[in-house]
Image (cartoon, rainbow, N blue to C red):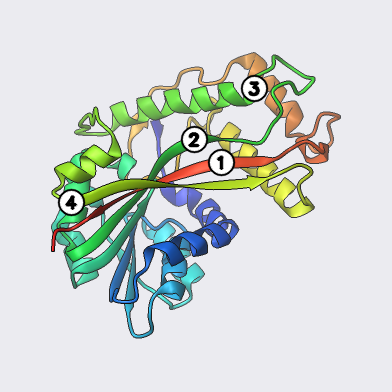
């Protein structure tokens, strides 16, 4: 059995918040309206989007960052440096703790890779939707397309290594969902979930991020570091996962997410002293598509 302690990942979430500053700023600028008075980041992680929302919102308005883990929230508090109000609350506890944390109807609620950690995802979406002011928007950053950074054939191991890493994460994620206490299946898509929550004008916008090879030194290091985190989370001794951050604790039975052969290849690719180290390749790239599903509260 493996316990998921998200406080241990607080530093990594803070790092991700800093690394994604440009993406967050661009998305926040497209979401915020001049008339918005209250914006909320639920499951805020390192506070990256909360900080971006605070920069995009008109002066004299309020941004609230909410997370269920106190260590994670502390990282968000430091990252946002007083620009937002940070509150401890969990979606799993229903709407009222969130309502008290926000203390006003919200014009915009953002939740990125957090609702999928709620035991009952539809109930969590229902709760978030109930916090909106008339005409307010709920934006869920969930799913998209798997990121691609590696060539199919790396000259070591069986080709298709990155595809198998995605598959391993998907299997872990399914087991994580099954292990949540009181887990409830949601056998339909995010837009259906927003509609079932009573929201209207529901739709999806997807954001493409692309950097062609060769990458600059800083971005190259960032890609390698991301692979290090993803592989470490799937190793037998950790059993952690690589899809966003969670908002509670659970257990999963260990199984072989990555084959021994693939694990051995990853160890070589991520060894700075090894001949196959990814950080010295000139053909790494960045291609990802992240989807944002948006619903509006009726006026």
Mark 3, mark 4: which one is toward the viewer? 4
For label 4, the SS is: loop
The residue wearing badge 3 is 161
**Of callouts 2 and 3, the N-terminal one:** 2
Q: Distance between the residues labelled 2 and 4?
A: 25 Å
Sequence order check, earlier mark of 3 and 4: 3
Decide: few, some or many residues near mark 1? Use Cα within 10 Å; few <14, some 14-19, many ≥20: some
User: On the rendered structure, is 106 left or right of 15?
Assistant: left
Task: Give the residue number, with chain letter if any, for mark 1.
Answer: 288
Q: Which of 145 and 123 is in front in this view?
A: 145
* Residue 176, image x, y percentages: 36, 30
Disc 3/disc 4 C-alpha distance (Å):
40 Å
Give left or right: position of 60 versus 146.
left
Q: Name the residue under label 4.
A: 199
Per the image, the residue denoted by label 2 is 145
- Earlier residue among tags 2 and 1: 2
Which image quarter is the N terminus in?
Answer: top left
Quadrant location of the C terminus in the rendered image: bottom left
* Residue at position x 82%, y 38% in the image: 282
Separation of residues labelled 2 and 3 (CA atoms) = 17 Å
13 left or right of 263 in image: left
The residues bearing labels 2 and 1 have C-alpha atoms spaced at a distance of: 6 Å
- The answer to the question of whether label 2 and label 1 lie on touching residues, with beta carbons closer than 8 A, is yes
Vertical arrangement, residue 294 with respect to residue 285, above or below: below
- From where the camera sits, is residue 287 visible? yes
């Amino acid at each position: 059995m493996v316990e998921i302690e998200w406080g241990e990942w607080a530093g990594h979430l803070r790092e991700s918040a800093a690394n994604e500053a440009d993406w967050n700023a661009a998305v926040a600028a497209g979401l915020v309206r001049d008339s918005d008075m209250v914006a909320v980041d639920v499951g805020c992680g390192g506070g990256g989007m909360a900080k971006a929302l605070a920069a995009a919102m008109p002066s004299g308005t309020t941004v609230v960052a909410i997370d269920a883990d106190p260590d994670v929230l502390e990282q968000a508090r430091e990252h946002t440096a007083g620009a937002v109000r940070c509150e401890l609350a969990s979606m799993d506890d229903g709407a009222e703790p969130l309502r008290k944390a926000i203390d006003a109807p919200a014009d915009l609620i953002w939740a990125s890779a957090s609702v999928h950690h709620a035991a009952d995802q539809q109930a969590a979406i229902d709760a978030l939707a109930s916090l909106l002011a008339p005409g307010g928007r709920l934006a869920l950053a969930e799913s998209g397309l798997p990121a691609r950074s590696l060539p199919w054939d790396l000259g070591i191991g069986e080709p298709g290594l990155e595809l198998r890493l995605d598959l391993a994460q998907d299997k872990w994620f399914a087991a994580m969902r099954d292990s949540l206490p009181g887990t409830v299946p949601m056998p339909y898509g995010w837009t259906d979930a927003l509609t079932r929550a009573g929201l209207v004008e529901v739709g999806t916008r997807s954001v493409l991020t692309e950097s062609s090879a060769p990458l600059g030194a800083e971005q190259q290091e960032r890609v390698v570091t991301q692979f290090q985190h993803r592989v470490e989370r799937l190793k037998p001794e950790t059993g952690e996962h690589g899809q966003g951050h969670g908002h509670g604790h659970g257990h999963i039975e260990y199984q072989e997410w990555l084959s021994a052969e693939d694990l051995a290849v990853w160890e070589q690719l991520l060894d700075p002293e090894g001949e196959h180290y990814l950080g010295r390749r000139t053909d790494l790239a960045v291609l990802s598509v992240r989807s944002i599903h948006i619903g509006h509260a009726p006026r």
